[in-house]
Image (tube, helix red, strand yellow):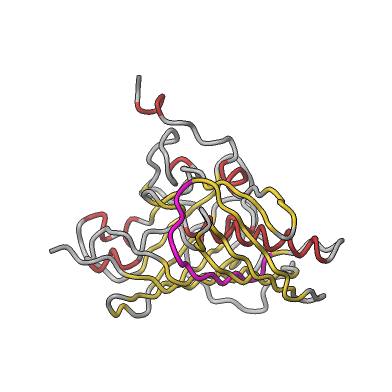
């Protein structure tokens, strides 16, 4: 039996399956963290953000019937790193309004608090930006880009989405050092690109500090904020991640997510812990 035959295949629409939540009443929701949205043994941080946004949006719809809000911002503190398996999300609607509604969301696993977030919901603009200054990236991976996929039968991100790296910025893959700037392209498999996937894209590149020779260890997120700016057009999302300051053990990371039409659809900023350098 081959390795591919032993590993469960990802669902036909792996992202849509991963962000499904089941209402439990009283503002609570159940969800299952699958093995296809993981980094190592732990659940992927961007996927957790999307799940909390999904629960928060449903809570707003329950509190204000007839409202179909979009996520505008999600700010999350990562208290612990959840494992694949069942989780529960509890929500408290703090405000409903015509412009913005605010919901507190808590994600627990096995009775332990894992993440605490605030979700701001409203309506995303459907007009072109008045002004923007975005990096110049081709709308699709060019010839020579590196496919990060581990194969469609593999577990982890390689089975859940198409993720390609911009080779010139990936110094660490050549065992070299370079500036903490990474670029790439990502799209979901078997389903349209939507605003929740754009949020996941804001946390899907490797840590920028890998280029500084830190090693390839775990770089746990401590706080992550995502600002949603527009509904993405179909196709690939272009990504640029960069760090402004690395002061051990901390580093920051800012990510711009640009859709196939060249519009900014999401920007994220996180504070994380750098991996220990090799000894």
- 137 in relation to 225, above or below: above
Q: Is residue 69 left or right of residue 176?
A: right
- Quadrant where the N terminus sits is top left
| Residue 120 x %, y % | 67, 72
Q: On screen, 16 above or below 139?
A: above
Location of residue 103 (image quadrant): bottom right
Residue at 44 percent of width and 63 percent of height: 80
Question: Where residue 55 appears, x then y in whole percent?
Answer: 67, 58
Q: Quadrant of the C terminus?
A: bottom left
Tell which residue pokes out farthest to the right in this image.
66
Q: Is residue 83 magenta?
A: yes
How many numbered marks does the figure carry? 0
Q: Residue at x 61, y 51 (%)?
A: 193
| Residue at image location 68% in from the left, 57% down from the top | 28
Which is more toward the observer, 190 or 84?
Answer: 84
Q: Position of residue 197 (x, y in %)?
A: 58, 55
Q: Is residue 179 left or right of residue 82?
A: left
Quarter of the figure with residue 226? bottom right
| Residue found 47% across the figure and 67% down from its top | 78
The residue furthest front is 111
**Rendering quarter of residue 195:** bottom right
Whether residue 189 appears in magenta in the rendering, the answer is no
In this picture, which residue range is highlighted in magenta?
Answer: 71-84
Q: Residue furthest left?
A: 279
**Residue 262 at x, y = what percent?**
58, 63
Image height check: is 29 above or below 256? above
Position of residue 232 in the picture relative to residue 210 (left or right) = right
Return the residue found at the far top.
Answer: 1
Q: Nearer the viewer, residue 105 or 241?
A: 105
- Left or right of residue 79, residue 245 in this image: left
């Amino acid at each position: 039996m081959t390795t591919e035959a032993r590993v469960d295949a990802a669902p036909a629409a792996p992202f849509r399956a991963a962000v499904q939540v089941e209402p439990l009443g009283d503002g609570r929701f159940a969800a299952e963290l699958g093995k296809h949205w993981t980094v190592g043994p732990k659940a992927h941080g961007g996927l957790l953000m999307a799940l909390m946004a999904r629960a928060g949006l449903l809570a707003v719809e329950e509190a204000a019937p007839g409202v179909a809000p979009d996520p505008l911002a999600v700010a999350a503190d990562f208290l612990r790193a959840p494992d694949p398996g069942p989780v529960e999300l509890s929500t408290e609607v703090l405000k409903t309004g015509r412009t913005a509604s605010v919901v507190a969301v808590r994600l627990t696993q096995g009775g332990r608090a894992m993440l605490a977030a605030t979700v701001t919901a409203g309506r995303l603009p459907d007009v072109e930006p008045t002004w923007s200054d975005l990096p110049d990236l081709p709308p699709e991976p060019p010839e020579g880009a590196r496919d990060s996929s581990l194969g469609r039968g593999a577990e982890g991100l390689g089975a859940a989405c198409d993720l390609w790296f911009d080779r010139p910025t990936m110094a660490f893959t050549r065992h070299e050092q370079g500036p903490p700037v990474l670029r790439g392209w990502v799209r979901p498999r078997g389903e349209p690109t939507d605003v929740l996937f754009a949020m996941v894209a804001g946390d899907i590149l490797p840590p920028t500090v890998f280029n500084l020779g830190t090693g390839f260890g775990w770089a746990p997120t401590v706080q992550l904020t995502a600002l949603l700016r527009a509904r993405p057009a179909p196709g690939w999302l272009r990504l640029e991640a960069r760090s402004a300051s690395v002061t051990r053990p901390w580093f920051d990371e800012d990510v711009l997510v640009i859709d196939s039409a060249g519009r900014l659809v999401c920007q994220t900023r996180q504070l994380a812990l750098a991996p220990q350098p090799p000894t």
